[in-house]
Amino acid sequence: MKIFDLEQQIMQCWDVVTDLELVKDETADALRHIYQLKFEKLFETFESVCAEYHAARREKKPAKMHSFQDNTYYPDKWVVLRWPSGACKLLVSWGNDPLLDGKGQLSDVITRVEEYGEGLIFHDASGSEYCVFALRYGLSAVTEDVYDEIEHQVELLSAVTNWLEMDWNDHVGQPWLRTYDGSQ
């Protein structure tokens, strides 16, 4: 189970509070209040467990602390870059954690995007997944430096792009692009 699945299940259970608002009597009001308190406590526990989990991963595996699995990433900042062939890649960074020391990464070519709760999951050609949130769209200090080196080769897509309706395979059949550092 992924952490987003767990969070979504917690949020769905919280709907019982909304359902109880439909019933107008003292017992329903009392139940609504009790469940509201229980779900608030549950979510506090969830957030605490997430914090402990991340702290433990930092101590155990500093190189992978931005990933719950080897191919699933949760960047702090992200943008989508499009090359002239139409191929798009994510430029992401983890800069809010001092142990990560502002690391950045360029994904492989994006193959598809799916909605996932409040966020999106970008899938790339290497099989990696990037779980992102719209409010975190933008360049960080680290990715600004990378972007400055390649901005003449790429287009930085707007934050208001409808990612779910894009044709992520419109580059197929185009000459393969190399990234700014020469790798594929």
Image (cartoon, rainbow, N blue to C red):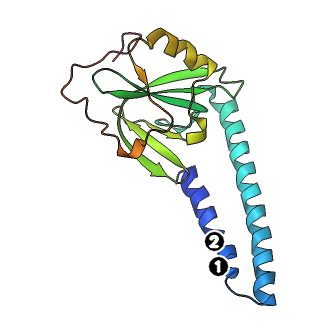
Q: Secondary structure at mark 2?
A: helix
> Mark 2 near mark 1, Cβ–Cβ under 8 Å?
yes
Query: Residue at left 48%, top 9%?
Result: 149
The residue type indicated by label 2 comes to Asp
User: Is 60 left or right of 31, judged from the image as shown?
Assistant: left
Q: Label 1, on which residue?
A: 19
**Separation of disc 2 and disc 1 at Cα?**
6 Å
Across and down, in percent, residue 116 comes to 49, 51
Across and down, in percent, residue 170 comes to 25, 33
Query: Residue at left 46%, top 36%?
Result: 71
108 or 159, which lies in front? 159
Report crowding for label 2: few under 14, some 14 to 19, many 20 or more residues within 10 A (C-alpha). few
Label placed on residue 15: 2
Compared with 122, 42 (above or below) is below
46 or 88, which lies in front? 88
Quadrant in which the C terminus is drawn: top left
Query: Do we see residue 6 in this rendering?
Result: yes
Compared with 12, 131 (above or below) is above
Q: Secondary structure at mark 1?
A: helix
Query: Residue at left 64%, top 79%?
Result: 19
User: Is 75 left or right of 124, judged from the image as shown?
Assistant: right
The residue type indicated by label 1 comes to Asp
